Structures are given as structure tokens and as C-alpha cells.
Amino acid sequence: MLIKDYYTIEGTSHTGDNTHIFHIRLNPECTVYQGHFPGEPVSPGVCNIQMLKELAEQVAGKRLFMSNLNLCRLTTLVTPQAHPTMSATLTLDEKDGTYKLRATLGKDEEIYLEMKAELN
Amino acid sequence: MNEPILTGEGLYKLIPQRPPIVMVDSFFEADAESATTGLTILPNNIFCLDGQLQEPGLIEHVAQSAAAFAGYAPYTRGESPKLGFIGEVKKFKIMRLPEVNEQLVTTLKVLGEAAGVTLISAQTNAGEETVATCQMKIFIKE
């Protein structure tokens, strides 16, 4: 984990061919919140992108380099207090060593973040 | 490159982020539609792993460069920086991960602005080499 103690994985499930679901808990004690922002903790969007990349690495079983973040929409301001638990849903397709990742982060019907990326 | 207008903790006048997640250390210049910022990658940077700045570190550097740009006009009027949030990242292409001790220089251009949302394009260089390009939408919280 790049950002130490940013999150924990509380469970996983696997649906369909390539879809993996991770149940996540954010850690409000993570040091990143000391600076983002002082007295007003907000989960940095890039830390959530990194978390999804690490989950993709776990599915792929190896370290990956994100050469292209084609699109990432951050639709909810996530805070570890208001949004302590969430689900990450990943679809990972590999062809000739390049992985196409589609991932969403959210809870119930609400989407916090969605992204498409190429990794290799 | 001219001497920076602000460096180090001087950037705190432009951005609300504080250690350990400050990802700009130089503000070189700005006009109404463009700005140039910089970051020297220190070994203790929170986004470094195995001597390289990882992907989220590059994205955060561009986002905070945009935040610094948004904070520059209020700063010249003696006002505090506002909180800015990334709304969308598009076509963030990374050619390579920069190494510790390299200096990133990022040039931002405003492509459009409406209702508190600013669309920017950015190019990040390490020396002569372009290491990343992207488009980003930033929301400024009033």
C-alpha cells in the first residue's frame, strides 16, 4: 500500500467473468488527513485512484504501471467520517500484456468515483 | 526559467493543502490563462516508492498546480486560498514515472471556465522530457 494505513479490505466477492468487488473501510487516522485538509479531512481523489489501482494489481497478481487514466469522474466529496465504508467494483480485461480497467467506488446506489484506465 | 514568484512554504498562500501532501514547491509565473509551477521530488515524498514518484503523485501535482493557479488571483488581492477539488481527470497519459531528485515543471492552460468549474490542460516536464499530459476539471469551493 503506497499511502500507509489509508484503507483496509474487509471482504471480497467475485461475480461474472472478470468482475471483482472489494469491501473497503477508510482509516480516518491516516496521516494524509493532517494535510488534506487541516481540520477538514477529505479523502484525496488521487488516493482513491491509487487504491483502485492497487486492487487491480491484486486481481492481476502483479505490479502494474498506469500509462493512461483515460477518464476519471469524482462525483462525491468523500470523507472518512461521512463515508467510512464503500465498495470497489473492478472489471479487468487483459490483452497482449495491457490491462483495461473499469472501476467504480461507491455505496448502495451512489457512485463516488468512476474511472477507466490502461495499465501494463 | 525566471526566478519563482513563490517557493516552499510560500505556496501555502496559494493552496490549502499542507504536509504530508504538498505537491508543489514553486510558482514561477501566471497570467490570466496560463501558469507554470514546479516540484522537486524529495525522497520522503508520500507518493514515492522505490525511488520513483508514483502515478497518483503526478496527478496530485497537476491538481495542486491548478489549485495554486486558482489561488494566485485571490493572493494578489490579499485573500486566502479556497478549497479546490478535482472533478474530472481526462487523458492523463504518463510516459514514465519521475525519479527522486528530478524537478518537475508543469505548464497549465485554461481551456474554459463556467460556474465555479475550470477546465485546464497540463503538461509536466522533467528537464526537456515530457513525463505526463492531461486535462482536468477543478471545482473551487466558494
Image: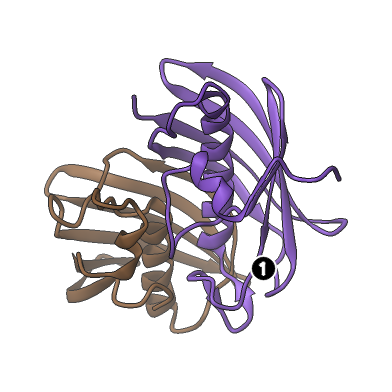
Chain colours: A brown, B purple
Q: Secondary structure at mark 1?
A: loop
Nearer the observer, B123 or B7: B7
Nearer the observer, A111 or A77: A77
Quarter of the N terminus of chain A within the rendering: bottom left
For the point 41% across and 30% down, which residue is it? B139
Q: Position of residue A50 (x, y in %)?
A: 43, 64
Nearer the observer, A84 or A41: A41
Q: Position of residue B113 (x, y in %)?
A: 53, 18
Q: Is residue B133 left or right of residue A33?
A: right
Nearer the observer, B19 or A89: B19
Q: Is residue B22 left or right of residue B1?
A: left
For the point 34% across and 29% down, which residue is it? B141
Residue B3 found in image quarter: top right
The chain holding disc 1 is B
- In this rendering, is residue B113 above or below B92? above
Residue extending farthest front? B78
Quarter of the C terminus of chain A within the rendering: bottom right
Residue A67 found in image quarter: bottom right
- Mark 1: amino acid: Leu
- In this rendering, is residue B133 above or below A117? above
Give the labeled residue for mark 1: B97
Disc 1 crowd rating (10 Å Cα; few below 14, some 14-19, many 20+) is some
- In this rendering, is residue A88 above or below A107? below
- In this rendering, is residue A72 above or below B109? below
Residue A28 found in image quarter: bottom left
Number of numbered labels in the structure image? 1
Q: Is residue A96 left or right of residue A18?
A: right
Q: Position of residue B58 (x, y in %)?
A: 59, 58
